[in-house]
Image: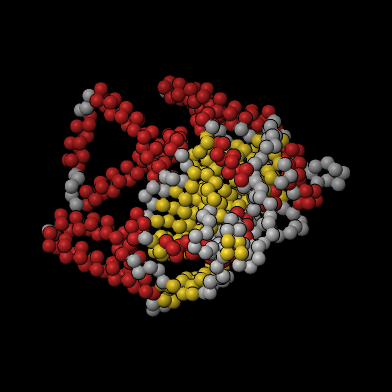
Amino acid sequence: MITGEPEQSAPAEGDGPGGPVAPPEPPDTRRLSPVSCVASALRELAALLVVAVSGLLISGFNVAVYFTLAALAMGLLHQAVRWWSFTYTLYPDRLELRHQLIGRSVKTIPLERVRGVDINASPTHRLLGLAVVRIDAAAGGDEGVLDGVSRKEAERLRQRLLGRRPTVPGGPRPEIVARSEPSWYWYAPLSGAYLLTPFALAGSVLGTLYNLSNEVGLISEGTLSHLGDRVLGFSPVLAAFVALLFVLAMPLASVLVFAWFNWDFQLRAIKADPSGEGNGSQGALLAERGLVTRRSVTLERRRIRGLELRDNPLERLLGVVRLTALVTGLGDAEHRGRLLPTAPRAVAEKVITRLGAMFTTPLTVHPPVARTRRITRAVLPPLVLGVVAAATGRPWLAALCAAAAVLGVPLALDRYRQLGHATDGRLLSVRSGSLVRHQQIIENRAVVGWKLRQSVFQRRGGVATLTVAVGAGEGGYAVIDADAAEAVDFARSVTPAWITPFLADDGTRASAAADGPVRPRETTEPPDGASGGSAGRSAG
């Protein structure tokens, strides 16, 4: 676990930093809340309304009403049977999910494998006082889902699944590490994802409406032809005005989407379990966000192997960044591992310092050959395409290719400036990318392997790509076009016992052109939950 807090001795049994704690709960078997049947039926109501409208248009009012009532009754019966046949039992060391009606299915999740707990509450669930608990285990993804428990039960499950003894009522709440401010919402237009999301959703809705209207005969070939004639008949001034409104609406829509997903974002620190044992022995981080659907994700501190900072040129210009935790065995890590949305860098540095992962060692500059390779990759393809276009009589395409080649030079230079790597003996850092810059800060002990790769052109330039394999995040992160000798030194400085046996006896380095994973001959077991994957980003 990345932490800068000193370890404290465990308090006596029954006492904690916030007062007395409750004794461990005995195993018990429970069902989902009975109200969950209503929540599931309401969730299916939208589909029933579509069926009702289709029946109304095709067969008349009476048939539509009878058909809808029959479908609603069947849905309620189905949800009631599902509720009655499902139980879950929480033991001191495992969680059992049991389905039994005609056959029987039992899923067992050892608590030691639990990596995170995700609690969601859609508008329907919030209205009925319910929540959805999703459990991430070592296999990744949703190992277990409890759809429809009370909020109190969801919080109890979160504490028990993470190995924490529930505190007595009235105890202290988790400490707030960071909380969103109104000014953060105006950073949304800087991100392409938030800019394009509203229009992707609008396209999906329009496509659904088109398919539905086509099914019931509201749209025909003649209707589309008539609509196309009317669009082509618009004056250029009106068309330009509509396009201008569309462009002006994009930033506002992105702000709305940002608020939808990140409203009242809070990052809280949960103190270590007073018993000093179990999954909660080193505390956890709790991230909450969402306007309509409230989402709460809990990450164990001892599972966090590193952090990733991500930004683009506009965000760098305004000093904002996104922060993600690299957690072992976490499914959907891009969203569930998010510690901060687009936020000021000062806030991100405060969180990083709180986690004991502030990295101040200057990054090693990559050799000039890496700059040449960046420029060649950016300029050569459009130039070749432009020559072909000019030779085939397409001057407009050749002009576009020439412009792309010119614009590619500053982009290539920035990509080179962002390359870097370093280690301070406890942490290592790798950085790459320009349009989307990534910088990972990883614990040295989280490294589970190395992969040194050289292409023919890299060998001629004396550079290599070194992939750092870790059991968290994407599984591996590439040090792109580093000096071949420096790449070996970097790997040796992080894991000397692994790399030294691969070096020549006279102290000189073995050939840096070795292609394949570099693994230890005899090592201790990798960090808990780590995998041996060595896949990383492709050389950029």
Residue at the spot 40% in from the left edge and 56% down from the top edge: 121
Residue at the spot 22% in from the left edge and 24% down from the top edge: 235
- Residue 381 visible (yes or no): no
- Give residue 78's quadrant in the image: bottom left
Taking 37 as reference, is 155 left or right? right
Q: Nearer the viewer, residue 197 or 305?
A: 305
Q: Position of residue 529 (x, y in %)?
A: 62, 59
Q: Position of residue 281 (x, y in %)?
A: 62, 60
Q: Nearer the viewer, residue 217 or 186?
A: 186
Taking 272 as reference, is 243 left or right? left
Q: Quadrant of the C terminus?
A: top right
Q: Nearer the viewer, residue 454 or 409?
A: 409
Q: How is the image coloured?
A: secondary structure
Q: Is residue 245 above or below residue 44?
A: above
- Residue 357 visible (yes or no): yes
Residue at the spot 51% in from the left edge and 71% down from the top edge: 90
Q: Position of residue 256 (x, y in %)?
A: 37, 40
Q: Is residue 273 above or below residue 456?
A: below
Q: Is residue 490 above or below residue 81?
A: above
Taking 405 as reference, is 363 left or right? right
Taking 380 as reference, is 213 left or right? left
